[in-house]
Image: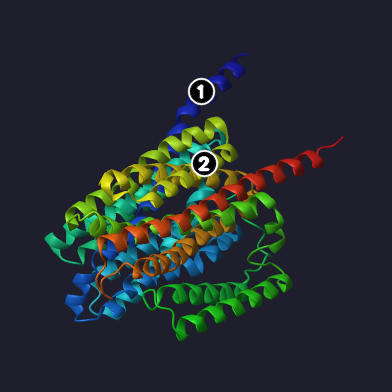
Amino acid sequence: MAIAEQKQNGDCASAPQKTRSAGLALASLSLATLLSSLGTSIASVGLPSLMQAFGASFQSVQWVVLAYLLAITALIVSAGRLADMVGRRPLLLGGIALFTLASVLCGLAPTLWLLIAARAVQGLGAALMMALTLPFVAETVTKERTGSAMGLLGAMSAIGTTLGPSLGGLLIAGFGWRAIFLVNVPLGLLTFALASLALPARDKTAEAAQNSFDAIGTVLLALTLAAYALAMTLGRGHFGALNIGLLVAAGIGVVLFGVAQTKAKSPLIRLARLYDIRLSASLATNLVVATVMMATLVVAPFYLSRALGLNAAMVGVVLSTGPLVSALSALVAGRLTDRFGAHRMMVVGLFSLAVGTSLLSLAATKLGIASYTVPIAVTCFGYALFQTSNNAAVMSGVAAGERGVVSGLLNLLRNLGLITGASLMGAIFAAASTGERQSQDMLTSAAAAHGMQVTFQTATVLAVAALLLALLSTRAGGRLSVRQQPS
């Protein structure tokens, strides 16, 4: 009896310790998410300063942003797969360290091309962090709190996106462009210290050492994704022979990668895994939703400045509404997901997204700023609810040994959706506003409003398609579960 009491006391004493450890682990994962999103948004505001500092053209300095995004896009799936094989903790710590070191190199870079190279290395560190934060949530947080944890990570991502431009502007004004990279160093050191202290010391899910890494598949996938990303970003919305050639190369790369995966002993992506209806639908929906959300970033500034006549300062303030709503909504979305279920909240989120984009397509300029802020609040709430519930559903539905690569796929398709949306929605807006322009370079209020309407009509069609896909996959998944139950 004394032994039983001692054991019970020991369990009671260890419970707060486990809670604190999980809290510290979640804090480190949240900071890692913040760092990776901040690395994307904070650099964009520094491009004019970089043009002046290095005497370079916009086409040259834009590679400071592109190199980071390309590194993430091309390597994130490979990072997740490698972590599944050798263990997540050392790779996550390595990613944080690499990101922090690359931030130092960016801040000290004497030439533009060394800065771009350092940004590519920083992107590799960000790819490791982005691929591994979601799997670690499943390992450090109880299943009942997975939604809340995913919501917190979503909120930190939105905060990083929102904070980047304003923080970057203040740092450049006070200390020069190098400060926008060096600010990551103390944050990176803090993240590394917390992760070293709190994350599990051993990975129980790492695969056996005899499973070799798929180097051929990794190279093919990286080249394919890089070709597609470049095709969508080069030319600033004008498709030429180079863009078409890169798209053809990406298509050939997809075929070669598929063939390589069927022949590989230990493939980078087990293609048979994609036959899971719910997983495939979640990944595809993630791509479509990211494409839809990119319209708010590409089109909204023109609507606010041209159609509503707001000055630059007010445009910035109004544009912050969306990320702010996303950050606040993500925390609420986590609790809703835990309480009502991930798949149900995913459908609710997509419905809200479709309603919001439909309201944005009305673009009633006579309502003033409210014609944007009210619909964007509905849209971003739906987006936050979808992202949180979709991540929770996917990560809780895959085996522990596959969480890294599936997390990589989730982040990859989100990035590809953003890249596709920037090109597609920008092209739709340009085409829709052409007929209303007074001249080639003059975008009138009517042209901006009409472009906004057509673009978000397209976005609404895509949002409804994503909603239908989610409903069909949920129903099909339910029927499959019933069939598989023993009679």
Q: Nearer the viewer, residue 17 or 302?
A: 302
Choose mark 2 or mark 1, whichever is in front.
2
Q: In this view, does 148 lie to the left or right of 99?
A: right
Q: Nearer the viewer, residue 287 or 219?
A: 287
Q: In this view, does 281 lie to the left or right of 60?
A: right
Secondary element under disc 1, as helix, strand or loop, is helix
Which amino acid type is marked by label 1?
A: Cys
Q: Where is residue 283 in the image (x, y as percent from the top left)?
A: 58, 55
In this view, the residue farthest toward the right is 487
Q: Position of residue 285 (x, y in %)?
A: 56, 53
Residue, x 23% and y 58% (percent of image)?
A: 305
Which amino acid type is marked by label 2?
A: Thr
The answer to whether mark 2 and mark 1 are in CB contact below 8 A is no
Marker count (numbered): 2
In this view, the residue farthest toward the top is 1
Q: Compared to 170, does 470 lie above or below?
A: above
Please say whether residue 292 is visible from this viewpoint.
yes
Quadrant location of the N terminus in the rendered image = top right
Q: Residues within 10 Å of mark 2 (few under 14, many from 20)?
A: many
Which mark, by number, is residue 122?
none
Q: Which of 344 and 401 is in front in this view?
A: 344
Q: Name the residue under label 1.
A: 12
Residue, x 48% and y 61% (percent of image)?
A: 417
Q: In which quarter of the image is residue 220?
A: bottom right
Q: Where is residue 55 in the image (x, y as percent from the top left)?
A: 19, 81
Secondary element under disc 2, as helix, strand or loop, is helix
Which mark, by number, is residue 140?
2
Marks 2 and 1, Cα distance to the nearest angstrom?
A: 19 Å
